[in-house]
Amino acid sequence: MSARLRTERGTILVTVILFVAIAIAALAAISSSRVVSESDHQRVLEQETQALNGAYGQIQLAMNVVNTSAYTDENRNIELRDAVAGLYGGTAGGEAEATEEWLRDPSGVVHGKIRGTDVRVYRGRDYVQRIAQLRGETPAAVDLDGKSQSYYVLEATGRAGDTTRLVSALVRENEPFSSFVFFQNRHPLGVSGSPRGLIHANDRVEFYFPNGDYVDSVSAVNGFDYKAGATTANTNVADGNDQAQRIDLEAIDFDDLRTKATFAGGAGLDAQIRLYPDGRVRVRQYTPPFYEEVTYSQDYQVIVGYTTQIVQEEQQVQIGTVQEERTRQVITGYTTETYTVDVPIYETQTVTRTREDPVYETQTVERTRQVPVYETQMATCTRWVQVFVPYNTDDGSGTAVGGSGGVAGEYEWVQETYECEQEVLVGYTTETYTTTEQVQVGTTTVTWQEDVQVQVGTVQETRTREVPIYGTETYYVDVPVYETQIVDVEQTVPVYETETRTWTEQVLRWPVLVSETYLTLGDTAATIYIEGRITSLRGDLNGRLTIVGNEKIRITGDIHYVDDDGDSAMLNGDDYTKPYVRNEDYDGNSVLGVIARDDVLYTGSMPSQAEINATLLSATGRVGIDGFQIREDGEPVKDWRYGLTAEEIEKEEAYRSTGTSNSTFKYDSLRRLGGIISNDRILETYVLPRSDGTSYVDSGFKRGSMRFDFNLLFNPPPNFVEVPRPVTISIAPVYLMRNQDG
């Protein structure tokens, strides 16, 4: 393991220790108990149960106090802070240590008490030392840089007879929004499949399609609905609350996020962000595209009238003529010419002609032929039929749905077999038959006469014709004589004036690259703040990062978590036919938070089988597929212009013209590791009904698979938004002590 990865893991080491230590301590606890006789076995079990139940009961009372606590402006739980400070007792409040040595705190560690109870409360880092002492190990200082300051451990003591049980609860002061796989602030939340992780809607939750399986907490303020074939009978909601309390998605302080950012983009600049597996992040900043109204002008020469003017020019002027003598051929008369021609002489003659004609007679003839023999047999036949195939899902799959209809799927042509009767050729038989035919039996000579014209000779005829006689004739013509002279000529010419024409055009100003910056995540978490729109986000992340966009954020490709060896956190993200499972070879700790003031959009430039490893949050807009708008009632509208002003449409058109599309798409699958927090309705899949009661995916992803990133419970993205309410991560028995006096 690289030094960078080891250091990176150290930043969350304490939280992992807290989670694991409780379970380890529970396994080791029995080592401090004494062996009891068989006759005391039943009594011991009863005492142990009573002691354990008593400790659990105290933990529950203490958690009720913590859960109902108010919070400071800095999202600090007042009850936890006051208790650990010793306001309600404990060694932090000046009480003496317990008489039992095994209940005493290690040196340098103090505890408080939850108001109105005897339940101890420790800071998380201190309780690690307490666990070490209970296990007989030398306590060691941990988390010196205070990374675990929002983690607390509540410890309750239960006693029955000579048995004492300790039970502890690991509590996080705030619940990060990254704990949710789906969080919907406004509008109904449509879900399908079997997503893992917390699901909450401040309106209602709509379950889509049959066979949904929701094994983690699902809560809604305004109840549950079942749509598109889902019913209460075919949908499993293991932990559902349809009358939950509202969880406010507080207005995010983007100015504060900018202040905390390790990289803040320039004012008004857009950005394209690319993540690299070696831990680098490239940020290219651009001026945003826009349409500008530009005024143009051009001078034209315009005819305003005509005028007459005298001009001098050289011309050929005729000054006289001269006679020329010429000759030509003319007919002077005609003469008669005699000539002879041979004319043929014909006479009519009778000619005798003959031909041979065939003679036929009707006869009966015997012939044979091969005839096929068939019999009826049962056979397996095939035929092509169109069948409805639902979109397949796997464990943990699911997607955010909008629209209506039945089971989502596609009609496919498949070849099916069936039993059928067929006429089968089993052989041939020879068949004799007779037929009547016309048979030629001979020929006959046919003679006939006909008259024909036959040339029998020629005779000469004398003929005459008129032939012209030619002679030569002389004649005279007058030929003009010219010379070049300068003369005055009157002309009509146009009169011009200069006229200026002015017009305006909308000119697209393309983005201009302003800067290119490479950031190295290294051993610490980072926050990137972009003032304008993030027009492209994609790549492989190796490290802890939060990206904040003060406008829209468009995801243009896959986003993967990778480690130093290039291993991805998940397998089969690009193949929906295979299970979406964790990669055992991945030993990284990457986590990405994406926070947008406006929308976080999946775009058509993503691959057809896409994967996103990130927690996505939209503060005032929505998370979902491109090309849609969400109505006030939460229904999706397949029109990116819907509800936009003319100014907003012009702005979006500028981005469209420069390659940022608002178009819808239909792709095969989206696989996600992480959650979605959205103000408006989340939309990853838009379905429409068919007339036969099924439905089809009109836009978005036909299949969705997601996995909750449990790393987010201990390691949320840096500076990510938190819910001001405590979350109990685990409750476990820690220690068992019997026969304390002995």
Image (cartoon, rainbow, N blue to C red):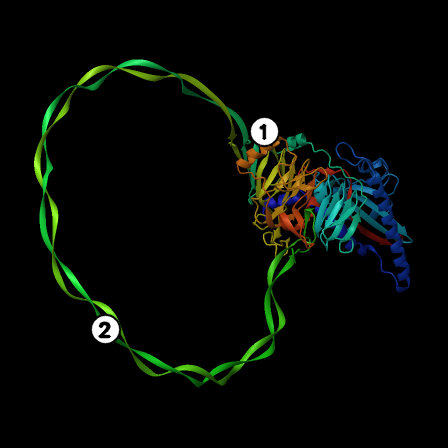
Residues at discs 1 and 2 in contact (Cβ within 8 Å): no
Q: Residue 31 location, x and y as percent?
A: 80, 56
Viewer-closest of 591 and 407: 407
Task: Say which residue label 1 marks.
Answer: 268
Query: Residue at left 60%, top 72%?
Result: 380
* Pointer 1 local density, CA inside 10 Å: few below 14, some 14–19, many at least 20: some
Height in image: 389 above or below 333?
below
| Count of numbered badges drawn on the protein | 2
Task: Tell me the kind of residue under disc 1.
Answer: Gly
Residue 38 relative to residue 662: left or right: right
Viewer-closest of 473 and 580: 473
Task: Say which residue label 2 marks.
Answer: 351
Where on the picture, by quarter, is residue 252? Answer: top right
Where on the picture, by quarter, is residue 642? Answer: top right
Residue 513 relative to residue 37: left or right: left
Q: Identify the mark nearer the N-term, 1 or 2.
A: 1
Viewer-closest of 203 and 57: 203
Q: Residue 512 location, x and y as percent?
A: 51, 31
Viewer-closest of 321 and 329: 329
Q: Residue 157 location, x and y as percent?
A: 86, 48
Tell me the distance, in whole angstroms, between the alpha carbons under discs 1 and 2. 116 Å
Which numbered mark, 1 or 2, is in the foreground of this view? 2
Height in image: 336 above or below 211?
above
Task: Tell me the kind of residue under disc 2.
Answer: Val
Quarter of the image for the C terminus: give it: bottom right
- The tag on residue 548 is none
